[in-house]
RNA sequence: AUAAUGCUGACUGCUC
């Protein structure tokens, strides 16, 4: 069973879910008994793949075989339901878990995160208020969740309370990083600096992620020179720049029209052995075409495609947008159609091309796109 | 007997 389980969870973690499922079938044929490890691996894998129906079936088959789920299996289900936005079912499962006595800190963390992600802030806060045992991940989830929902000051209070409780709770770099991020995004750089100091005071070391948060905060408030200062100084503080650091800086430089420096930045990144990722390409394509360097941008686009990369929705949207604004609405339409066939579209895609058509006066085409929004089961915003 | 396999949290790109 262990060999099978290792294999199944391994396959699921690599995104090879169907192979994981095949192996499960083989396991059943060979009359190997599945255990809770098998079930939770499968449930986790399937829900990560967005196949909540499949995860449900595994769960129900398990219950049908009179195998009692344990807390890990329940947590995996809970996580899947939360991520799929099935809030009602989350609450039901949560109640059941309570009745069965199957709730641990991770259950709370998972459920809290789900509530925050689905905008159920009041519910999350009351769950948090009544919580007796919290670990560092709980703080990470709560601070992040509050900030994402706009309750930045409330998040600060959570950290202050942790401070007053003394050494009994560990607030770690994840919570600090979320806090610093939110403060930076609001332009509250002094307070962000205060949190960095607080972090140091608690012996929590700065890492590349936190530096990136600071760099992006400065970039988003057009304080490029501060951003570059953090970038240059981070190595000496034991945080080497990552692809994300470079991406942030490239984005900032391009948006500021500082192409020479952006170019140097890409060059440095390559020289240091970092591989540009899909976001590097997207950033470059968007930034270059914004400044009428569409040809260079399209070269990069083709280079990306020809080197065996697969664009994601955002990248397609960028290209469509830039094709439209450079007068190549027909090319944009072609790309749009391909994307729709592959079901690789979202609301931004439709909005983008619709606006493209309006700008060149093709109102009938725009109306047709409007129709596609509901056809694709999306809600206009 | 013990050990090995399963569940949670932070940063970057798109329509203005």
Image (spheres, rainbow, N blue to C red):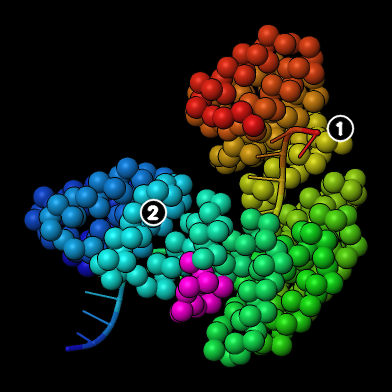
Quick one: label 1, few (<14), some, or many (20+) residues within 10 Å? few
- Residue highlighted by disc 1: A292
Q: Quadrant of residue B5?
A: bottom left
Q: CA distance from mark 1 to mark 2?
A: 49 Å
Q: Is residue B14 left or right of residue B8?
A: right
Q: Position of residue A129 (x, y in %)?
A: 52, 72
Instruction: Tell me if residue A324 comes above or below residue A25 in the rendering.
Output: above
Residue at x 62% of width, y 62% of height: A146
Q: Is residue A126 left or right of residue A160?
A: left
Region of the chain picked out in magenta, as a range: A127-139
- Residue highlighted by disc 2: A90
- Name the residue nearer the viewer: A313 or A232: A313
- Name the residue nearer the viewer: A206 or A157: A157
Image quadrant in which the N terminus of chain A is located: bottom left
Image quadrant in which the C terminus of chain A is located: top right
Determine whether the residue tagged by mark 1 lies in a helix, strand or loop.
loop
Residue at x 74% of width, y 23% of height: A355
- Tell me if I can see residue A121 in this picture: yes
Instruction: Tell me if residue A321 comes above or below residue A123 in the rendering.
Output: above
């Amino acid at each position: 069973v262990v060999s099978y389980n290792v294999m199944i969870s391994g396959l699921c973690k690599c995104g090879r879910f169907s192979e994981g499922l095949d192996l499960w079938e083989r396991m059943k044929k060979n009359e190997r008994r599945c255990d809770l490890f098998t079930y939770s691996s499968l449930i986790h894998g399937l829900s990560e793949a967005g196949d909540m129906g499949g995860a449900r079936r595994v769960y129900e088959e398990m219950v049908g075989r009179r195998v009692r789920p344990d807390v890990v299996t329940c947590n995996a289900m809970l996580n899947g339901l939360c991520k799929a936005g099935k809030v009602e079912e989350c609450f039901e499962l949560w109640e059941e878990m309570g009745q069965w006595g199957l709730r641990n800190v991770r259950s709370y963390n998972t459920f809290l995160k789900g509530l925050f992600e689905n905008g159920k802030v009041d519910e999350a806060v009351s769950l948090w208020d009544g919580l007796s045992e919290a670990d560092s991940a709980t703080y990470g989830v709560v601070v992040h969740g509050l900030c994402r929902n706009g309750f930045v000051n409330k998040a600060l209070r959570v950290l202050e309370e942790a401070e007053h409780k003394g050494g009994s709770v560990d607030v770690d770099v994840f919570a600090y990083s979320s806090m610093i991020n939110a403060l930076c995004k609001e332009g509250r750089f002094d307070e962000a600096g205060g949190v960095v100091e607080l972090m140091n005071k608690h012996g929590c070391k700065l890492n590349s992620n936190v530096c990136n948060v600071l760099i992006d905060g400065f970039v988003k408030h057009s304080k490029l020179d501060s951003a570059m200062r953090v970038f240059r100084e981070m190595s000496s503080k034991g945080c080497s720049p990552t692809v994300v650091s470079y991406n942030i800086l490239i984005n900032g430089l391009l948006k500021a029209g500082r192409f020479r420096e952006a170019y140097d930045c890409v060059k440095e990144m390559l020289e240091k052995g970092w591989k540009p990722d899909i976001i590097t390409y997207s950033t470059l394509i968007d930034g270059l075409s914004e400044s009428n360097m569409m040809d260079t941008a399209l070269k990069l686009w083709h280079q990306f495609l020809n080197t065996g990369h697969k664009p994601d929705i955002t990248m397609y949207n960028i290209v469509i947008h830039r094709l439209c604004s450079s007068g190549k609405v027909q090319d944009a339409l072609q790309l749009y159609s391909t994307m729709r066939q592959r079901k690789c579209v979202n609301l931004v895609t439709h909005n983008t091309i619709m606006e493209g058509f309006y700008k060149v006066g093709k109102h009938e085409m725009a109306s047709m796109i409007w129709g596609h929004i509901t056809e694709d089961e999306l809600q206009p915003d």
